[in-house]
Amino acid sequence: MKPKPLLFLLILPWLAMTSCTDNCRETRTYRRYTPVSFTGTQIRQGVGVEAARALVKPGKIYTKDGYLFINELKEGIHLIDNRNPSAPKTVAFLRVPGNGDIAIRDNILYADSYMDLVTFDISNLAAIRPVTRLANVFPSGMFEGGYWSYNSQNDMVYDQRVDYVTETISTNCEEEPTPNGFWRGWGWPVMLFAQTASFDATKAANPSNGVAGSMARFALYDNYLYAVSNSDMQLFNIQNPAEPKLGHKIQMGWGIETIFPYKDKLFIGSQSGMYIYDNANPEKPVQLSVFQHARVCDPVVVNDNIAYVTLRSGTTCQGFTNQLDVVDISNLTNPRLIKSYPMRNPHGLGIDYPNLFICEGAYGLKSFNASDPLAIDRNQLQHLEGMNAYDVIPMGGVSASKSLLMIGKDGFYQYDYSNPRQLRLLSRIPVSAPSYY
């Protein structure tokens, strides 16, 4: 007896569903955002010196007089004795809630602590002491993973904690497959990347300053500390380094990310272009020009009449461009693109001419000979993979050492680049556990 057509049509969908349920399993890693808030008192009473601890979520790097300072994202600063690059020694951990940037003049360390600027006397690393605090000078800011804001009326900081959750779930075959690395329901991609340079700028400005990477939001020049936020540049008079005084604030538009001082100019990286400021009067920098590009993240370093700008896509940065732009700045009022080079996902970069180093995030570290700006791609010297590179500081510009400092999401690396075609690993400080942030 033949089955009735109607019964057959009813059985077909059931057969299709039961044939898939045993096999459709998916592992997903996604960002989970949890709102958090802190009182001003909690933040200000949270500052202190602790025993050295392991790197967990390293951020930006800074160096001065053979010592290394590594930001632990939103928590504080690792202090490391790096006078022997082959055997760096952790000294202490300076707890600074909401910290993201560092600068040092003489023996005074400047650090942001959410809405405040705090200073520390580090002349004796065994007895660091807080010196001053300028309250409520940063109304908002940005860390990897999102923005924070400060409400002065109730003295509250509003931020978010970002956790990465991996789970394996069962699905049926009718469910639209979710790309691995997306948050269900919202579609935020998990970017496994690292997110701060030349030393001539700092050396020319003041030899008592330390040196930052290309991702820095703090810069020192003459008697001033410059701090860029998402939309402005706040100046601090540090003629007396231990007693910074609030100076002018310069509105700069939106999407401001990094600052790089070179001679008497400031080069500002933003999500829409590179701003060039004349700093002949350090108290009141004046904008000279803007080199515009697609909406992407944009750190910059400079050597002589050439600026090197990396553009990258990503969740925070938006856009889809990943490239190196080489820009002629011989006419500072009219910067001109020389050539663009495709990259994978470039982050921070450093120049000790003619050696150019570019961090490619999850794709590692690349070194180039940049002597011919029209042939940089044909003069790649080395590509180191297997690490997640965020920012670099080449030390050859200010010392006899050809040591390259590199920070990434998986730790701190130090290379000898005496032979730029074959970087030699000197030391490494790993993170305490694999990190997806």
Image (spheres, grey):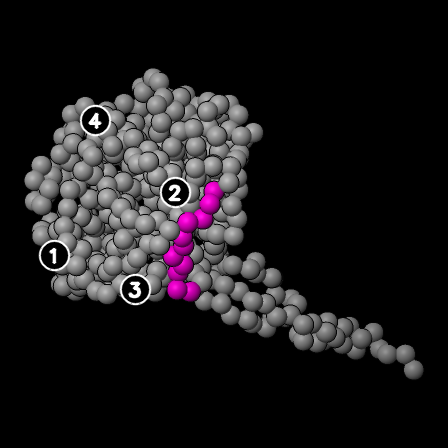
The residues bearing labels 3 and 4 have C-alpha atoms spaced at a distance of 39 Å
| Residue 117 forms part of the magenta stretch | no
Q: Is residue 400 left or right of residue 423?
A: left
Residue that badge 2 annotates: 404
The amino acid pointed to by label 4 is Asn
Q: Nearer the viewer, mark 1 or mark 2?
A: 2
The amino acid pointed to by label 3 is Arg
Q: Which residues are magenta?
A: 423-433
Q: Nearer the viewer, mark 4 or mark 1?
A: 1
The amino acid pointed to by label 1 is Arg
Q: Residue furthest top?
A: 331
Mark 4 or mark 1, which has the lower sequence index? Answer: 1
Mark 2 or mark 4, which has the lower sequence index? Answer: 4
Could you say where residue 179 lies in the image, as x and y percent from the top left? 57, 58
The residues bearing labels 2 and 4 have C-alpha atoms spaced at a distance of 29 Å
Could you say where residue 18 lies in the image, as x and y percent from the top left? 70, 76
Could you say where residue 166 lies in the image, as x and y percent from the top left? 49, 67
Mark 3 or mark 1, which has the lower sequence index? Answer: 3
The majority secondary structure of the magenta stretch comes to strand
Mark 1 or mark 2, which has the lower sequence index? Answer: 1
**Quarter of the image holding residue 336?**
top left
Would you say the residues marked 3 and 1 are in contact, meaning their CB atoms lie under 8 Å apart? no
Residue that badge 3 annotates: 53
The residues bearing labels 4 and 1 have C-alpha atoms spaced at a distance of 32 Å
Residue that badge 1 annotates: 129
Residue that badge 4 annotates: 279
